[in-house]
Amino acid sequence: MPAERLRILVVDDSALVRQVLCAIIDAQPDMQAVGTAVDAVAARARIAALAPDALTLDIQLPGMNGLDFLRELSGGPPLPVLIVATPTEAQAQVVQQARALGACGVLPKPRLGVAQGLLDDGVAICQALRTAVQAARRARAEAGPSSTSAAATASARGGPATPGRAPAAPPAGGGRAVRGERIIVAGSSTGGTEALLQFLAQLPPDCPPVLAVQHMPAGFTRSFADRLDRNLPLRVSEAQDGQPLQPGQALIAPGSHHLIVRRGAQGRLEAGLLETEPVNRHRPAVDVLFDSAAVLTGRRTSAVLMTGMGRDGAAGLLALRRAGALTYAQDEASCVVFGMPREAIALGAAGRVLPLSQLGVALMQDLAEAGNSG
């Protein structure tokens, strides 16, 4: 007997977005779009009437915005919520607030070609929803029947359950990655040009594809990538939009674009470039790269955050660790500026804290132990 399909509610004030998301969801054999809502009022009613397993939520809604609605939901029975929203100038704050309120992930809508962009990200959207629902179900099972009963009773009455919600897993936990598809992501800022060189020098020529963000102005990253390419056994280049990811290759984010990992038309992992607003005052931003990997490759990712001022990359490294990735931060003694790694360590985002001279070696040893399992 086939398993029951996951029931998804789509909340967005755009008719086009609702139509495309419903089509994406209904095309999956294990889920269905049970309804839509254009605002928080309608969403509240649909949740009560349809009892969805999860919902997608826009931020810019008429009346109550998506974050306020998410805050309202966080006081009730656990309901996984995936934010699918147009990036804003305050994107970093939006992501941080959404995570704090229990969102299972935050995926950006493309500014141009919205329908095609959503279709391109369809598998990631559906996998994030699957993972979140599974995590919520595990949390309910671990909490025991009394907790589940209380939540069900509160839901039937239309009131909140006990404060807080079950921990929704971060988006992917392995996401769309298939067996053997491992990637390495790295971020750095002040002092990072030499740190990145030393880190990459520790990786073998057949290592998984590497995507790296180094805070640099436009016009400098290509010459930086060329210098790395001349001094390393890896093939290093400035990333291009749509460039396939290959073993033994390192791609450096251009100074004018955010770098992400995404799934291409042929189903393979590739680099994507975005001209959306700066995040953490940076473009490229480490958090943008790390967030995309958390959604797409999850536990198949190894992530390293190195020397730099500020906090860019800390939240993204936490999302990756929660998704099952191997996560590393450079220790204070070997950093030029300890800001970014310190913020990540304070969040509990770093699985291991190591000197720069050991980061790449430890990462490859951990990968060898992990093998291609999971």
Image (cartoon, rainbow, N blue to C red):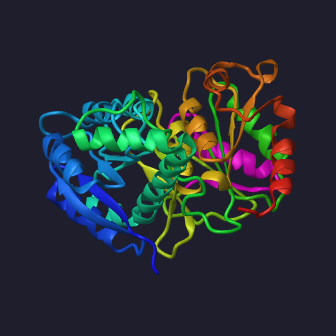
Q: Is residue 53 left or right of residue 350?
A: left
Q: Is residue 219 magenta?
A: yes
- The answer to whether residue 254 is above or below residue 245 is above
Q: Residue 9 lies in what quarter of the image?
A: bottom left
Is 131 in front, or is 270?
A: 131
Give the total of numbered labels. 0
The residue located at (39%, 38%) in the rendering is 150
Q: Is residue 358 visible?
A: yes
Is 184 in front, or is 346?
A: 346
The residue located at (46%, 52%) in the rendering is 273
Q: Is residue 260 visible?
A: no
**Residue projecting furthest to the bottom:** 1
The residue segment tinted magenta is 213-239
Q: Is residue 60 left or right of residue 52?
A: left
Is 299 in front, or is 159?
A: 159
Image location of residue 49, percent across then percent down: 19, 53
Q: Is residue 206 left or right of residue 50?
A: right
The residue located at (28%, 64%) in the rendering is 33
- The answer to whether residue 370 is above or below residue 95 is below
**Image quarter of the C terminus:** bottom right
Q: Is residue 325 magenta?
A: no
Image location of residue 120, percent across then percent down: 40, 65
Q: Is residue 155 left or right of residue 181?
A: left
Image location of residue 366, percent across then percent down: 83, 48
